[in-house]
Image: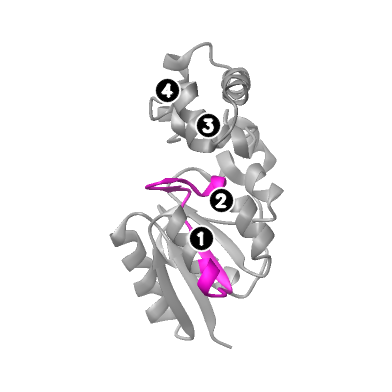
Amino acid sequence: MQKRILIADDHPMARKGLRAIFEYYFKDTDLTEASTCNEIMRKLLKTAYSHLILDITLTDGTVLEILPNIVSLYPRSNILICSMQPATVYQRALNHYGIYHYLSKSLPEKSIICLLRKFLNNERPAQEEDAQIKDNPFSHLTARELEILHYILQGMGSNEIANILNIKYNTVSTARTHILEKSLTNNMTELYELATRYNVT
């Protein structure tokens, strides 16, 4: 049966690269592209997709902001996160939503094809070792804290973040405190340096 796939990435070359892989190795697929969170939700409203391939960071926000709605409204869609950012940062937050497929864009083509084949066959992948998660200072952040971290690293203040995420200022302020505590940093400068070291944006 043909699989209907939505590929969401804000970089055209990344979308085209994935499309080329699917068209060459996985013939029986119907591919659609999106570049923003809003576009993802609009396309999901019109079409039932069997598989979603989503980058973490898009031009209008992070996929973490819309995942609760996607999982709730479209439970039959299988989801894979495809990102340059380390899987260990997001694994626990994604597992909370029942998402276990994570593809690093830095992998060699052969590994990407193998992971995509498992994803299309709905085979649950092996998880990262717990030791790797513990070694990453951002791995214990909740999904909400990761959302807020994304905007903090863009230099936004608490009021601006609260407006974007439509949450209370106090929620953002509390999350900032938790992010510093969990990452064992004392201020924003240390947090920026740590995020750069671990390729978190």
**Between discs 2 and 1, the one toward the N terminus:** 1
Q: CA distance from mark 1 to mark 4?
A: 31 Å
- Three-letter amino acid code of the residue under disc 2: Ile
**Between discs 3 and 1, the one toward the N terminus:** 1
Which-is-in-front pick, marks 1 and 4?
Answer: 1
- Three-letter amino acid code of the residue under disc 3: Ile
Residue 60 percent location from the top left of the image: 40, 46
Q: Which mark is residue 66?
A: 2
Q: CA distance from mark 2 to mark 4?
A: 25 Å
Callouts 1 and 4 close, C-beta under 8 Å: no
Callouts 2 and 1 close, C-beta under 8 Å: yes
Disc 4: which residue: 192
Looking at the rendering, the stretch of residues picked out in magenta corresponds to 44-66
Instruction: Look at the numbered disc 4 and give the secondary structure of its residue.
Output: helix
Instruction: Look at the numbered disc 1 and give the secondary structure of its residue.
Output: helix
Instruction: Look at the numbered disc 2 and give the secondary structure of its residue.
Output: loop
Pick the quarter of the image with the C terminus. Answer: top left
